[in-house]
Image (spheres, rainbow, N blue to C red):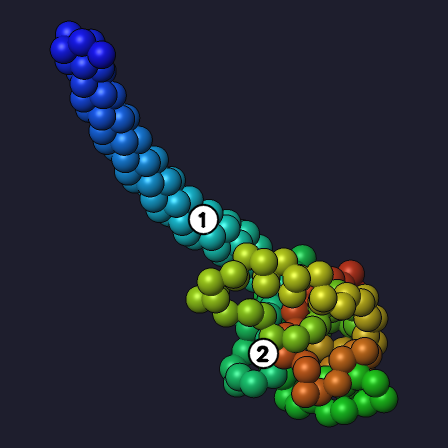
Amino acid sequence: MGRKTRDAALSIVVLGIFGLSGCNRANSDYAKEMKQQSEKLELASVRIDQLTRRLTRLEIQAGIERGRYKSAVLDPGERGFSRLDTSVGSFAISLQNVTSYADGVRVRLNVGNLTTATVNGGTFLVKWGPREPSTEAPDYATKFGEWSKSLREKTIDFQEDLRSGSWNSVTLTLSGLPPVQFGYLELSMETNKISLLQPR
């Protein structure tokens, strides 16, 4: 092999080495860029998930606010009363006591008639079930959906007179949920029978 041939071969080898080095550097830069883009996408996905959960909470809370006072929500573990608006006026509802009954519970309500008319019976639309999940739970939207589906619902007629300006006792029997699991009660009420004082 002549000197010129050896020099040419050496040049090709050197160029090849530099070429491979350049390719390796390019591949390394590409891999680094892809990793950075992947990390950015992952962060964006986490942020979108957080915003979605927050929006779901706000939508649920807005729905509750829109229906405020159309139903009374009671927690067996808390004292106090809830306001309930009906077609004939407003009422105050509280839980007097909860006892075990068959495969469910018997609930005694205090129904405060805030109107000036005596209500002669009516109908309760009742929803009951376990306690509502905390809004602070990271998977609140999922848990809220599952909890909503678990609620039982029933229409119950009552014959008791709800005297005006007074607390009145009404008892409801709710099946299928033992007292230890009973944590939520929601009521709406309708009536079309009232009594007013006659003019003298």
Q: Which mark is residue 49?
A: 1
Q: Residue at x 68, y 81 (%)?
A: 182
> In the figure, is residue 197 to the left or right of 67?
right
SS at mark 1 in the image? helix
**Where is 95 relative to 145, above or below?**
below
State the image coordinates of residue 124 (x, y, percent, origin top left).
Answer: 75, 68
Name the front one of labels 2 and 1.
Answer: 1
In front: 55, or 77?
55
Q: For label 2, count other residues whose C-alpha is less than 10 Å away and answer few (under 14), some (14-19) or many (20+).
A: some
Quadrant where the N terminus sits is top left
Q: Residue furthest front?
A: 1
Label 2 to label 1: alpha-carbon separation: 31 Å
Q: Which residue is mark 2?
A: 75
SS at mark 2 in the image? loop
In front: 30, or 129?
30
Q: Which mark is residue 40?
A: none
Q: Quadrant of residue 108?
A: bottom right
Task: Give the amino acid type for the residue marked by disc 2 in the picture.
Answer: Asp
State the image coordinates of residue 33 (x, y, percent, origin top left).
Answer: 29, 34
**Where is 193 relative to 183, above or below?**
above
Task: Give the amino acid type for the residue marked by disc 1 in the picture.
Answer: Asp
State the image coordinates of residue 63 (x, y, percent, origin top left).
Answer: 54, 52
Q: For label 1, count other residues whose C-alpha is less than 10 Å away and answer few (under 14), some (14-19) or many (20+).
A: few
> In the figure, is residue 3 to the left or right of 108?
left
Of callouts 2 and 1, which one flags the residue occurring earlier in the amino acid sequence? 1
State the image coordinates of residue 175 (x, y, percent, origin top left).
Answer: 82, 79
Quadrant where the C terminus sits is bottom right
Q: Residue at x 61, y 83 (%)?
A: 76
Q: Residue at x 27, y 35 (%)?
A: 28
**Where is 163 relative to 61, above or below?**
below
In front: 115, or 106?
106
Q: Residue furthest right?
A: 102
